[in-house]
Amino acid sequence: MEIYSLRFFALLTGTLSLYPALLPAQAVPRSDANTQPKQTRQLYEKALRLEKEGKTAEAIGAYNDLIEADANDPNGLEHRARLLLRTGKAQEASHDFAAALVVKPDDGETWSAYGDCLNTLADWRGAAGAYRNAIQRGLENTGLYKKLGDALAAFGDNEGALQAYATAIKLRLDSPEPYFARGVLLMKLRRERDAIEDFGRVTEFHPDFAEAWFRRGTAWGELGEFEKAARDLSVFLRLRPGDAEGLAFRGAAQDTLGRTAEALADYGGALQARPDNARVLLARGELLDRLGRHKEALADRDRAVELEPANGYVWLARGGTQLALGFPDKAIADRTRAIEIAPRDAMMWFGRAAIYSRLGQNEKAAADLHEALRLKAGFSEAARLLQDVEKDLQKEAAASAAPSRDQAPPRTAVNSNAGAAVAAAPAVAPASAARPPTAAPGMQKPRTAAASATEARPPAKAASESTAAPAGPGHSQAGPPAAALAKPTVEQLHSEGRALLDQAQFAAAVSKLALAAEADAGNARIWNALGYGQMRLKRHREALAAFDRAIALKPDYQNALLNRAVLKRQMGDREGAALDLKRAAELGRQRR
């Protein structure tokens, strides 16, 4: 009767590690084929024969007969457990494994199989305990240590998992599985270079291990080394042609490298394989917006909204495209919907504020920016835009208090910060949101805010609208001094230059931005935009000088650091690129 009480206790509590302590060494004699009574031995042999013949249902029935004849038969319990597990009945299988281990607690193979069963049930702690019991009972091999590492990693014991993987590798240096599993965990721990080394080991031993090429490609992307990312992802795609994820991530790498046609082809292939992939739709929509192909971008945005209507970021992105197409009311409506979906996400408020600012509705913009800063203290982009919006409000107040017939009319295009804010807002998404591959875990694409605007900007005003006609010879003219007229001119040049960047007219953009930088040499955003244009024209030295100037003026300018990292990588300065990316990542963490 004691054995049945113990088994019932085990099924209720799952405390298998207590069995050896609870049971005397000779409490129940071990059953095997040599000591079984003739009847049970015949039943066991019949069940085993049916199992070998692949007649699973009949074999389970025979094991049922065996266990009914001898409830303590460990062979019947274990074999039935394995068959139940194979047929998807893991919970029932776990009961049989538990009962078998009460009878033979020192059997390492049974502990290992029980660990597999608990692993199937997502009982990671229980699985890890079972695998450890198997190891303690002399069952040591690479596969078992690898499974132990997987279980430990699943419930967050990362150090224990790394130790288990290291032991698995030590037992068999040429086995790819523990290297790969450790690489995946190292990626999770943000140790990309260590992960790359492990994935490299896998590809050395097994060049056809497709998933290792994919993982290493995404790791290179996380480090900003997009040429290497594209190369590894291309190998992956040769092994798995048409894979949607591989095409999506390679498209992100191609996009970052400025290979627009290749990026569009990859995004298109990814969507052909998986038409319902909202992340890729968002990524392609962003690229199409940057190319000025806003109607095509809108089609992608509409489809993303249809697929994920509860994702605020798809509404945020579509709002930017609506504004680019000249539909400000629809743009505001979309970004209002984004706020309704995620009212505690500061980016939603920031995104709508950027549009209000662009439209000259500064009071509404200020209200949204205050809410964004309340939700996310240290949100530097929102703080900068708020400063500009408040300056505009002060100017409006001064103009209404002391009107002058010679005063330039209020400008309809707001400062460059607003443009950058509207451009950047759709590209930022939380880990839980469906995002374009350019922002997904696996490959973070540096955001070039000065050159990736997703909306068309309002046209600059004609000179006749912004200033009084110049005085002729011998005549005087009342009005603001020359210094007061310079700032709107700089802003117009900057805005026009950025619009030309969006249209991929890089030479014309550089001409405008160079004039703006000459007139306002202390504006870091102008230098950043100028550097981007020079970089796209392959004028690497001029681009580097511009980015250096932007960062000297504003050392915490994350977008300029990211742009310079991409440039340095193109110039072959890998160490410099890594340093810039590291600094940019630190700034990103500080802002979170």
Image: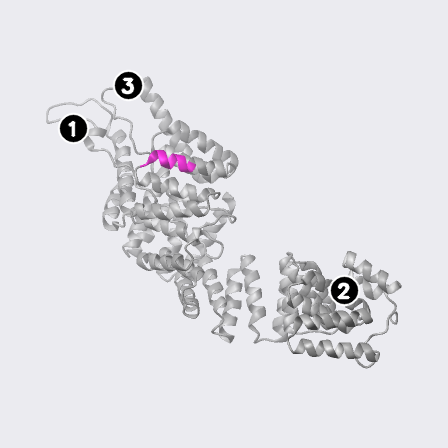
Q: Secondary structure at mark 2?
A: helix
Badge 1 density bin: few <14, some 14–19, many ≥20, Cα 10 Å: few
Q: Quadrant of residue 115?
A: bottom right
Badge 2 density bin: few <14, some 14–19, many ≥20, Cα 10 Å: many
Q: Is residue 136 visible?
A: no
Q: Main secondary structure of the magenta part?
A: helix
Mark toward the viewer: 1 or 2:
2
From the viewer's perspective, tell me whether residue 488 is left or right of residue 200: left
Q: Earlier in the sequence, mark 2 or mark 3?
A: 2
Which residue is at the front of the view, 331 or 170? Answer: 331
Q: Please give the label number shown on residue 470.
A: 1
Q: Please state which amino acid type lies under the numbered disc 1.
A: Pro
- Whole-angstrom CA distance, mark 1 to mark 2, is 95 Å
Badge 3 density bin: few <14, some 14–19, many ≥20, Cα 10 Å: few
Q: Please state which amino acid type lies under the numbered disc 3.
A: Pro
Q: Secondary structure at mark 1?
A: loop
Q: Position of residue 448 (x, y in %)?
A: 37, 49
The residue at the point 88 percent across, 68 percent down is 24
From the viewer's perspective, tell me whether residue 592 is left or right of residue 515: right
Magenta segment boundaries in residue numbering: 327-335
The residue at the point 26 percent across, 26 percent down is 409
From the viewer's perspective, tell me whether residue 567 is left or right of residue 205: left
Which residue is at the front of the view, 111 or 136? Answer: 111
Q: Position of residue 270 (x, y in %)?
A: 40, 59
Q: Which residue is mark 3?
A: 403
Quarter of the N terminus within the rendering:
bottom right
Q: Earlier in the sequence, mark 3 or mark 1?
A: 3
The mark total stands at 3
Q: Position of residue 464 (x, y in %)?
A: 19, 30
Q: Which residue is mark 2?
A: 98
